[in-house]
């Protein structure tokens, strides 16, 4: 583009003529006309916004009976669902453009991202759930997270919408049980819908650490910064083969892509261009399915202060070596011990250690404590249980932990903070975590050598003696802090796998 300040200066050979009174009047009339036109454009702009919202909202496919009422002004958790289904009326040209086949695709939900929006709307966090996460699915035992939607559909009868609603409800229930959060709304998009949205927004800029060439997804990109059209964008978010971390890198790509598209959507180039905005609105609304309670205007008002840099991304915590084979299936193992504190960190809630510290210790006689030996030392759990029994606790049977553990940790079921505090008061320096794996407060002894102490030892250390005192542990006995959620802010300078 030519910059006018780069052009050579032009010096007129004659003096400019003086304006006549008539010319000045014409100029004033012209400026008045322009000012009036701008005012009309502003009025029309406000009307256009109203029309745009109506146009957008009316094009969305709504499904009822999935979630409860919308509560404007409160924190919102919106589940974003993507699956591989192809509409029955897709043309051969569309199949070719999407680099896929006409086999109908799969109803499995290969993309599951929870969008958390705090009450003040100043930020948003995209929390990804790997599709192969090994979870408990209500009514179906343990399985891959992406199967929950299909189980729900297959369990239901009725119309296509009713089966769809049942599938979404089971997926939402599974994620709610997993995270402890309430899912307020959901938005679902199919393979073709994703393509249509990406096509309406135009090329998106991405940066790759390494060149990729994946025949499964069709992704064939060099390393470095590049612009992707809609077809390439679809290949980009679908690739998992050939990436260092497989499906985990694919989840990161989806977060990255959503962040880049959000920045593009929030830019003045989209929002202040009525033609482009109308095209985007039409493509997006006709491509979405969502619950009938999601008030988009209210959500937009809540997010009015959101800037592109305020969008963070995170993935639920996984075990250090997360890949495993169970019943012949390759699955991803979640770090359930770290999950509650992770969710608290993302949503601004209190960690397990903070909640236990603030709780009033329960009377030992009302607390049942189990001890598992993860240290490998002979008689460790028996010795620890004997100490707790002498302090007035109800105790279980000595047991070995299923695996060795480095850090001695007090685990407690949700809501048992007071019981955990009573147990922790006699276990100086132990960590604490909430876990749904145990019925009672459970101590797993670690290789760090920490063991419970009796009443006199605990008193000399400044902790309660087991009498139900609400005094807090001393600094030397304070629960180990839990790590905060590892979130990322993607921008145009970020390169990923």
Image (cartoon, rainbow, N blue to C red):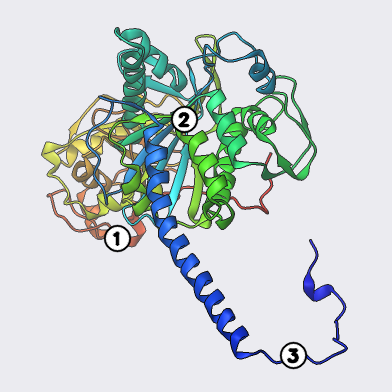
Disc 2 versus disc 3: nearer the observer: 3
Residue at 66% across / 89% down in the picture? 19
Q: Is residue 195 left or right of residue 81?
A: right
Q: Report the quarter where the N terminus lies.
A: bottom right
Q: Could you say where residue 126 lies in the image, as x and y percent from the top left?
A: 47, 42
Give neighbour class at mark 3: few <14, some 14-19, many 20+ (Cα, 10 Å).
few
Which dot marks residue 17? 3
Can residue 464 be seen from the camera position used here? yes
**Which residue is rendered at x = 44% and y = 22% of the image?**
145
**Mark 1, mark 3: which one is toward the viewer?**
3
Tell me which residue sits at (54%, 9%) in the image: 328
Measured along the vertical axis of the image, is residue 143 above or below residue 18?
above
Q: Earlier in the sequence, mark 1 or mark 2?
A: 2
When the figure is inspected, residue 429 is found, relative to residue 379, above or below; the finding is below
Label 3: which secondary element:
loop
State which quarter of the image contains the C terminus. Answer: top right
Q: Disc 1 vs disc 2: which is toward the camera?
A: 2
- Label 2 close to label 3 by CB (< 8 Å): no
Provide residue 187's location: percent of width, then percent of height: 41, 32
Residue pointed to by mark 1: 474
Q: For the residue labelled by badge 1, is the local secondary structure a helix, a strand or a loop?
A: loop
Whole-Å distance between the Cαs marked 2 and 3?
58 Å
278 is higher (above) or lower (below) than 144: below
Res 345 seen here: no
Mark found first going from the N terminus, 1 or 3? 3
Frontmost residue, 318 versus 58: 58
Task: Return the residue nearer the eye: 79 or 204.
Answer: 204
Task: Give how far across and how far down residue 279 sits, in percent.
Answer: 54, 40
Q: Quadrant of residue 160?
A: top left
Q: CA distance from mark 1 to mark 2?
A: 59 Å
């Amino acid at each position: 583009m030519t910059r006018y300040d780069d052009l050579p200066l032009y010096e007129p050979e004659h003096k400019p003529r003086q304006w006549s009174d008539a010319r000045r009047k014409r100029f004033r009339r012209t400026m008045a006309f322009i000012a009036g036109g701008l005012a009309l454009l502003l009025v029309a702009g406000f009307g256009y916004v109203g029309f745009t919202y109506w146009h957008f909202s009316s094009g969305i496919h709504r499904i009822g009976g999935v979630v409860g009422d919308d509560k404007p002004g409160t924190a919102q958790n919106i589940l974003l669902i993507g699956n591989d289904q192809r509409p029955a009326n897709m043309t051969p040209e569309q199949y070719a453009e999407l680099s896929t086949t006409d086999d109908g695709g799969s109803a499995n939900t290969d993309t599951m991202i929870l969008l958390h929006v705090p009450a003040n709307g100043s930020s948003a966090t995209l929390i990804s759930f790997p599709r192969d996460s090994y979870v408990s699915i209500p009514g179906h035992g343990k399985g891959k997270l992406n199967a929950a939607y299909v189980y729900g559909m297959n369990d239901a009868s009725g119309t296509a919408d009713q089966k769809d609603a049942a599938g979404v409800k089971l997926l939402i229930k599974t994620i709610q049980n997993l995270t402890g959060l309430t899912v307020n709304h959901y938005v679902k998009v199919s393979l073709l819908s994703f393509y249509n949205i990406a096509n309406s927004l135009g090329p998106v800029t991405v940066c790759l650490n390494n060149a990729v060439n994946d025949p499964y997804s069709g992704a064939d990109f060099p390393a470095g910064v590049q612009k992707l059209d809609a077809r390439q964008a679809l290949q980009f978010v679908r690739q998992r083969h050939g990436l260092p971390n497989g499906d985990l890198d694919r989840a990161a790509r989806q977060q990255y892509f959503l962040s880049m598209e959000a920045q593009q959507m929030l830019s003045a180039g989209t929002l202040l261009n009525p033609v482009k905005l109308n095209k985007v609105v039409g493509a997006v609304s006709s491509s979405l399915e969502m619950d009938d309670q999601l008030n988009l205007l209210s959500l937009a008002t809540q997010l009015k202060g959101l800037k592109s840099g305020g969008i963070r991304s995170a993935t639920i915590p996984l075990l250090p070596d997360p890949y495993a084979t169970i019943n012949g299936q390759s699955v991803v193992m979640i770090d359930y011990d770290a999950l509650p504190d992770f969710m608290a960190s993302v949503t601004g809630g209190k960690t397990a250690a903070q909640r236990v510290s603030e709780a009033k210790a329960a009377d030992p006689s009302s607390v049942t404590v189990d001890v598992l030996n993860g240290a490998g030392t002979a008689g460790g759990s028996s010795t620890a249980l004997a100490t707790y029994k002498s302090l007035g606790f109800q105790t279980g049977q000595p047991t070995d932990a299923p695996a060795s553990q480095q850090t001695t940790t007090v685990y407690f079921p949700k809501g048992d903070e007071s019981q955990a505090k009573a147990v922790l008061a006699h276990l100086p320096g132990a960590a604490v975590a909430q876990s749904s794996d145990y019925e009672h407060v459970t101590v797993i002894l670690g290789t760090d050598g920490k063991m419970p102490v009796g009443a006199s030892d605990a008193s000399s250390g400044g902790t309660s003696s087991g009498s139900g005192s609400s005094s807090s542990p001393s600094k030397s006995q304070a629960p180990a802090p839990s790590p905060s959620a590892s979130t990322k802010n993607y921008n145009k300078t970020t390169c990923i796998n």
